[in-house]
Image (tube, rainbow, N blue to C red):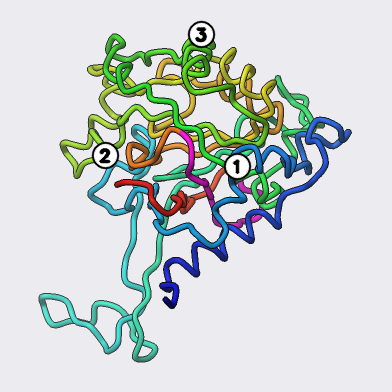
């Protein structure tokens, strides 16, 4: 039987992912935290190699951007877009030219914060450059997204269910995801391995990433108005614990990796080590606890602290919906 186009594309992505990984231990290089990848043995331990030729389903983990959706942070300026060119000269309701037309094609223009929608945080987001004289400055502050190794942004997915922590905190606060919570998960599902991508599934974006004004529950109410609980977030100690396990990359379906009341300590705990992560993922409930392969491909922009990202997971043949 001839393989489907989706199956061929999934297999190609997996071959690319495996090709991008390094055989060296990411802790062994003096440049660890900047240019090191995760080791091939760790990937094999996570069964990523078994995906080749049999990945059959792609799960989109990325939220939609639109003016009516709460893709922006708190009271920051929202995402905006407009038609850059239309197939022919458009007119407004008064019959006047609405915008120019340079030919028979359609395109849009966007204005957005780097940290909009499903996004990647790079070390420079919270770590100042080494010669800046600012608190927490270090060499990691020079690592912007355009310099960050792509091999860090993919790997065997580990999904930690924290749905019971959603809405468990007081208004204006996030329920903490502790080291003990992660260790309890490991006692049931096995130790987290070097090179795995740890994803925190709370169902927060699935519940609250809704058209405005209902979507104010996403960040406006917990962060600005402080009338609702925030998303569950790992403690700084939990992030450090995962780094010590050999984890470079994380993901959350909350609006931020840090808690709503003060995100800096959690961000610094990981970004100072050269870690990275995605925020505002969605559909994490469609992934198995283990068995998916995670890939994030952010936009590449000079000097970026973060990026709008398309995140996906590849599921092997036989995984249920």
Pointer 1: residues within 10 angstroms few (<14), some, or many (20+)? many
Pointer 2: residues within 10 angstroms few (<14), some, or many (20+)? many
Earlier sequence position, callout 2 versus callout 1: 2
Q: Residue drawn 80% across and 30% down?
A: 27
Q: Is residue 117 left or right of residue 209?
A: right
**Residue under numbered circle 3:** 180
Question: Would you place residue 170 above or below residue 239 in this image?
Answer: above
* Label of residue 305 in the image: 1
Quick one: SS at disc 3?
helix
Q: What are the residue bounds of the magenta stretch? A: 290-304
Earlier sequence position, callout 3 versus callout 1: 3
Confirm whether the magenta stretch covers residue 296. yes
How far apart, in angstroms, are the residues tagged by discs 3 and 1?
A: 31 Å
Q: Say which of 243 and 100 sits in front.
A: 243
Q: Residue drawn 31% across and 11% down?
A: 169
Whether residues under marks 3 and 1 lie with C-beta atoms below 8 angstroms apart, the answer is no
**Residue under numbered circle 2:** 209
Quick one: SS at disc 2?
loop
């Amino acid at each position: 039987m001839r393989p489907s186009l989706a199956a061929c594309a999934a297999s190609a992505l997996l071959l690319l992912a495996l090709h991008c990984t390094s055989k060296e231990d990411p802790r062994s290089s003096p440049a660890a935290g900047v240019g090191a990848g995760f080791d091939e043995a760790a990937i094999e331990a996570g069964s990523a190699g078994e995906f080749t030729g049999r990945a059959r389903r792609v799960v989109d983990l990325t939220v939609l951007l639109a003016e009516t959706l709460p893709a922006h942070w708190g009271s920051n300026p929202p995402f905006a877009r407009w038609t850059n060119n239309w197939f022919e000269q458009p007119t407004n309701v008064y019959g006047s030219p609405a915008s120019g037309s340079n030919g028979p094609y359609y395109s849009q223009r966007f204005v957005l914060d780097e940290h909009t929608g499903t996004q990647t945080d790079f070390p420079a987001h919270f770590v100042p450059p080494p010669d800046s004289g600012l608190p927490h400055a270090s060499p990691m502050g020079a690592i912007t997204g355009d310099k960050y190794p792509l091999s860090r942004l993919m790997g065997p997915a580990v999904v930690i269910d924290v749905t019971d922590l959603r809405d468990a905190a007081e208004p204006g606060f996030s329920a903490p995801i502790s080291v003990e919570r992660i260790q309890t998960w490991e006692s049931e599902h096995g130790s987290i391995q070097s090179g795995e991508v740890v994803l925190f599934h709370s169902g927060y974006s699935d519940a609250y990433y809704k058209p405005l004004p209902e979507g104010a529950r996403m960040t406006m109410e917990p962060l600005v108005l402080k009338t609702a609980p925030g998303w569950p977030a790992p403690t700084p100690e939990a992030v450090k614990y995962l780094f010590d396990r050999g984890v470079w990359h994380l993901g959350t379906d909350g609006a931020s990796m840090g808690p709503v009341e003060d995100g800096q300590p959690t961000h610094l705990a990981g970004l100072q080590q050269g870690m990275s992560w995605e925020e505002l993922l969605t559909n994490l409930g469609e992934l198995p606890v283990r068995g998916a392969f995670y890939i994030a491909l952010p936009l590449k922009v000079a000097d970026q602290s973060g990026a709008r990202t398309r995140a996906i997971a590849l599921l092997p043949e036989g995984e249920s919906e």
